Each structure stands twice: as structure tokens, then as C-alpha cells.
Amino acid sequence: MILNKFLPFSDHFKPGALSIRLLAFCLISFFSCNKTANINGNKSFVALTHLAYGVGAIQLSLNGKPVFPDSLSFGKTTGYDGNPYDTTISQVSLMKIYLAGDTGANVSGNAAFRQGGQYSIFFFDSLDYRSVSLIILQDNPTIRTDTFTYYRYMNFSPGDTLWGLKLINNRKDNPYAADTVVIQPRLFVGFNNIPSAYPINNLIRSGNYKVFAFRDSSNPAPDRSNFDSLGNFQIDSMVNYNINLQGFYGDTLTANKFQLQCKALN
């Protein structure tokens, strides 16, 4: 479990007064009395996604040791598609997230990760008085062995609009109702900060999908003003996914463009 709240960022991290809210899943950790007895098995796996708008590249360390070899720029997830995780020891650790190249800690606190557990850490910015926040979610879903797999959907687009997703399978023959998937609208994560609200237990059939973000209704209005095309992405069987909506609606030219990120976790 997270043992104490994370400390605020220093003033030079970002203009204005900042406050940190740690939105952490309550994680149960199991430790042997002798931590060195099974040092090769005493591992946890963590992935970090940077969604704090206007914040430069960041790094994460546990007990003073960087977890990832490279700094992480905005909009990116660590690792590579299919394995965003890096390995750490499953013990109580001092966790720090800081600007790349910075010698001091910008945010820090004690955290523990369960042995063998896989975790997605999201560092994000609501652009309001709550400013930078952090949420830690446990992954480890059951791996499917048929044509379906699991996903988690999170809305990181700041604002008070509830955004859902409509996925339409691109295959020409469409005999299954499951080939059209409606993901129910969600508030921006900053307004819905309960980690249990983001389980990775939603089912989707493998395939290539055309994706639309929608508000108000999953059916397009006559002028399609409630729909926004987000392109296509591939869902493979036996692979679990984080599906994240990010950016600002109507922004198409900058790093903050309204877009979908689909990250394979295994």
C-alpha cells in the first residue's frame, strides 16, 4: 500500500501554486522474513505514462535508483508495445518523480508493490487548482485464450465532458454483435479518482477497429457534432490493453491534440 502522501513539487517545476493528490490503489504486499532468500523471485513490474500537460520529460526512481533507463516525455509510456514494464524489488520503497536532469525530488512518498504484481502508474495534469496528480493501478488480468481479450479505458482529456468510445470492426463480414463495441462515457480521471473505477476486466473481440469518441449519445447526430473520428487500432487476442483518451477536443495541431493511445500490456 502507499504508506504516506506524496510531497508537493518544488516551485520551479511548474508556474503557480501546485498541489499533489495521490490517487493510489490500495495494494497488499507479501514479504518473506528474509528478503534475500528468494531475491530472483522478489520482483514487481511497473510502467509509467506521462500525461501532465506542459510538463517536461520526467524520471521515476525507487530508493534513489532510476527505474527506467531514459527520461519520459509527455504523451509517452515506458518500455515498448507489449512490454511497458521495468523490474523493481517488491518492498517498501521511497518513490520519486522528478524532471529529467533535476537533482532534487519534485514529488516523493513511500510505496509498496506486491511480489509478481504489474502496475500502471499515470502521471497527469488537470490544469485546474488540483494540478498534477498521480494514480497507480494494478494490472495482472487473466489472460484470455480465445478471440476475446481485456482492456481498461481512462479519459485523460481535461474538462467536464463525459467521453465514450464507439469501436466498429473493419472486417467486411460482420455477423457478430460484439464487432461493434460501445465503451460507456467517463469523466476526466481528475474528477473520478477512485482506482477501483478503472478495472482491467472489460472484454473486447480481437480485430482491427475504426474508433470514434462520442458525447451525449453513441449514435451520431445528423451533423455528427457529437462524434470525433480517432482513426483505427488493432486489438490482438491474448493481449491486454490500456486504452486512454487524451488531449483537448478541437486541438489537432499540437502535442495536446485530441487522440487515443492504445497500449498493449503483454
Image: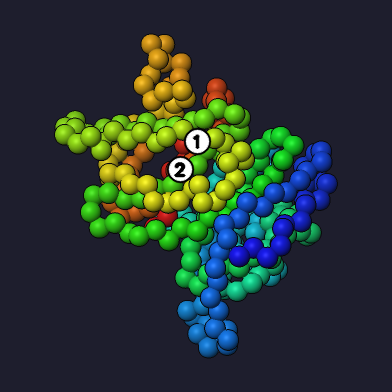
Which residue corresponds to the image point at 39% horizontal and 51% vertical from the top-left? 201
The image quarter containing residue 111 is bottom right
Q: Please tell me how many numbered marks the rendered image carries.
A: 2
Judge whether residue 254 can be spotted in this image: no
Compared across the picture, whether 220 is left or right of 45 comes to left
Q: Residue 27 location, x and y as percent?
A: 55, 64
Pointer 1 local density, CA inside 10 Å: few below 14, some 14–19, many at least 20:
many
Task: Quadrant for the C terminus, please.
Answer: bottom left
Pointer 2 local density, CA inside 10 Å: few below 14, some 14–19, many at least 20:
many
Which residue corresponds to the image point at 36% horizontal and 50% vertical from the top-left? 150
Q: Which residue is mark 1?
A: 186
**Callout 1: helix, strand or loop?**
strand
Q: Compare residues 143 and 102 and report the one nearer the observer.
A: 143
Give how far apart the Cα atoms at labels 1 and 2 are.
Answer: 9 Å
Specify the color scheme: rainbow
Q: Residue 122 location, x and y as percent?
A: 58, 50
The image quarter containing residue 121 is bottom right
Residue that lies at the very extreme toward the top in this rendered image = 222
Which residue corresponds to the image point at 36% horizontal and 21% vertical from the top-left? 219
Q: Nearer the viewer, mark 1 or mark 2?
A: 1
Task: Quadrant for the N terminus, please.
Answer: bottom right
Q: Which residue is mark 2?
A: 153
Identify whether 45 is placed above or below 206. below
Q: Give the residue type at disc 1.
A: Arg
Compared across the picture, whether 81 is left or right of 113 comes to left
For the residues bearing labels 1 and 2, Cβ distance under 8 angstroms:
yes
Q: Residue 138 location, x and y as percent?
A: 50, 58
Judge whether residue 226 can be spotted in this image: yes
